[in-house]
Image (cartoon, rainbow, N blue to C red):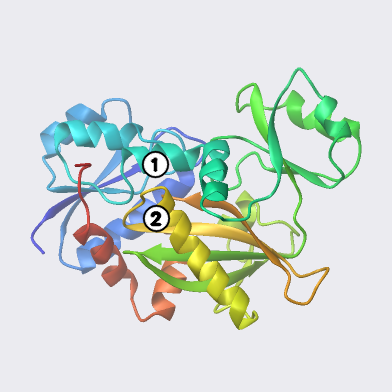
């Protein structure tokens, strides 16, 4: 318990504020658990800061590109500082929604149909039935996710203000219910259903107080519950993740009684704020927040 933990947070991605909230909450819990803690707001001088701070372990509370795409993981591997959450390869794969869906489908997991498109060719709009989804290839926390419900003007307006590269992912919209499953140390915790008055679990619904309602365990047929738990664990293992992950699903029960479960994406750096899902699911399993962050720290490592 005398280990020195550097909590990495902030950074410069679009999820900076969420990362700061996650990092501060985790730093406080780690102190309660008995660790020595240094809080580091990450900038491009992070290698020099870590060399001076000399932590035993880095708790990675960064979100978005740089923090969860393999970059910070590669640096920590080079510096020989054990770190929490997934390693370089799993992180780089998970941030790429196109590549992960290929791997998930090969593993037998059902994902929404979709395609990669470019801003200068909008012919795809005629091939998808509305509503459909436009999302960045490599962002988290629903950043940049848009549901196209009406006409061409919606697409023109969205892509006219698009700041996530020339390419984007287009997917069929799956109606039904929003579900999520956390995996901790190779064990799925439970299934949570997420509802929101906003009609879509977007960035604000995820992080604003009262933006969403979390129902856990979700009231589902037993078969669907087991299917979601198994699929989350399969996704975690398929990418070679470690520590904690959270996998998001849509459950379409609008056409038939049992319905169909679709895997949307896996998050290797799930939020750890007051409104976050992983701490809620851990608490449901009898793991309080200081114990949760301790468990995450205990399995910290560099890539072999």
Residue 77: % across, % down: 21, 36
Please identify the residue farthest to the left as the structure is shown: 2
Distance in Å between CA atoms under marks 1 and 2? 13 Å
Q: Is residue 12 toward the left or the right of residue 231 in the image?
A: left
Instruction: In the rendered view, tell whether residue 198 sits above or below residue 150.
Output: below
> Tag 1's secondary structure?
helix
Instruction: In the rendered view, tell whether residue 240 sits above or below residue 10.
Output: below
The residue positioned 21% from the left and 29% from the top of the image is: 47
Q: Is residue 290 toward the left or the right of residue 253 in the image?
A: left
Residue 245: % across, % down: 42, 57
Viewer-side residue, 208 vs 70: 70
Which one is earlier in the sequence, the residue at label 1 or at label 2? 1
What residue does disc 1 label?
Answer: 91
Residue 147: % across, % down: 77, 45
What residue does disc 2 label?
Answer: 237
The residue positioned 54% from the left and 47% from the top of the image is: 106
Please identify the residue farthest to the right as the structure is shown: 151
Mark 1 crowd level (few <14, some 14–19, many ≥20, 10 Å Cα) = many
Q: Toward which corner of the image does residue 151 lie, by quadrant?
A: top right
């Amino acid at each position: 318990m005398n280990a020195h933990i550097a909590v990495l947070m902030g950074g410069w991605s679009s999820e900076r504020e969420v990362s700061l909230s996650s990092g501060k909450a985790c730093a406080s819990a780690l102190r309660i658990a008995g660790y020595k803690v240094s809080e580091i707001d990450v900038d491009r001088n992070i290698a020099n800061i870590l060399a001076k701070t000399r932590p035993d372990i880095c708790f990675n509370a960064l979100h978005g590109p740089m923090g969860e795409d393999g970059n910070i993981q590669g640096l920590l591997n080079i510096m020989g500082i054990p770190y929490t959450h997934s390693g370089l390869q799993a992180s780089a794969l998970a941030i790429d929604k196109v590549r992960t869906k290929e791997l998930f489908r090969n593993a037998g997991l059902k994902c929404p149909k979709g395609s990669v498109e470019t801003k200068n060719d909008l012919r795809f709009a005629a091939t998808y039935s509305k509503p459909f989804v436009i999302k960045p290839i490599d962002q988290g926390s629903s950043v940049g996710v848009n549901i196209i419900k009406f006409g061409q003007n919606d697409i023109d307006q969205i892509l006219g203000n698009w700041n996530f590269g020339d390419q984007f992912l287009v997917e069929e919209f799956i109606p039904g219910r929003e579900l999520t499953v956390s995996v901790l140390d190779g064990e799925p915790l439970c299934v949570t259903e997420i509802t929101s008055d906003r009609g879509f679990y977007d960035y604000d619904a995820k992080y604003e107080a009262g933006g969403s309602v979390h129902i856990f365990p979700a009231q589902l047929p037993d078969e669907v519950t087991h299917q979601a738990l198994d699929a989350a664990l399969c996704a975690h293992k398929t990418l070679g993740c470690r520590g904690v992950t959270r996998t998001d699903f849509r459950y379409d029960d609008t056409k038939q009684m049992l319905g169909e479960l679709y895997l949307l994406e896996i998050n290797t750096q799930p939020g750890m704020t007051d409104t976050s899902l992983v701490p809620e699911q851990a608490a449901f399993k009898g793991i309080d927040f200081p114990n949760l962050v301790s468990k995450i720290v205990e399995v910290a490592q560099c890539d072999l």
